[in-house]
Image (cartoon, rainbow, N blue to C red):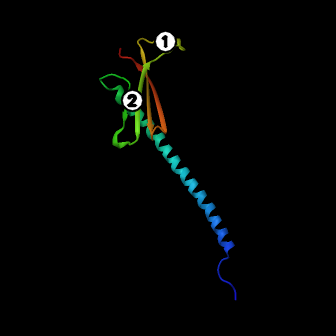
Amino acid sequence: MKNAGFTLLEVMIAMAILAIGLTSLFGSQSSSVALATETRFNIQAPLLARLQLSTIQSSPEGIFADNGDFGDEFPGFQWELSVEEASFQDSELLEQLEGKMQHLMLTVTWGEELFSYQLDSYQRSEE
């Protein structure tokens, strides 16, 4: 009579092959999720930064350092604006501009500052 079924060795080899295959599959899935998360940030952060900078520049109160978030529509996204006097010591042409210029640096962060995007802008000072 012939024995029907699998030997212990055959079952162990099948389990090893299955384990290797599943490990590779889960690794690539994890990598895909990480890339999708980074891509989401890289698309949304510049748009949010430009929107926030436009809102700040059109504000009648003037421009000053500030920070905040983007509300419930974009949870986890934070912004911070710093303002400093622009210096153009390396360029004679830019030094000749009338009036003072401001250097605006708007930083958008997401996920406890895991991801960060900075938008720099220059504008004439209102002073």
Q: Nearer the viewer, residue 24 or 6?
A: 6
Q: Which residue does the numbered mark 1 point to in the structure image?
A: 95
Q: Secondary structure at mark 2?
A: helix
Q: Which residue does the numbered mark 2 point to in the structure image?
A: 53
The amino acid pointed to by label 2 is Leu
In which quadrant will I find the N terminus? bottom right
53 over 77 or under it: above or below: above
Left or right of 94: which side holds 17? Answer: right
Q: Where is residue 25 shown, x and y percent of the image?
A: 58, 58
Q: Where is residue 122 shown, x and y percent of the image?
A: 44, 22
Q: CA distance from mark 2 to mark 1?
A: 25 Å
1 over 42 or under it: above or below: below
Instruction: Give the crowd class for mark 2: few <14, some 14-19, many >=20 residues within 10 Å.
Output: many
Considering only order in the chain, which callout, 1 or 2, is on the residue closer to the N terminus?
2
**Which quadrant would residue 20 be assigned to in this image?**
bottom right
Q: Nearer the viewer, residue 7 or 54?
A: 7
Residue for point 50% across, 15% down: 88
Give the residue at the far front of this rendering: 8
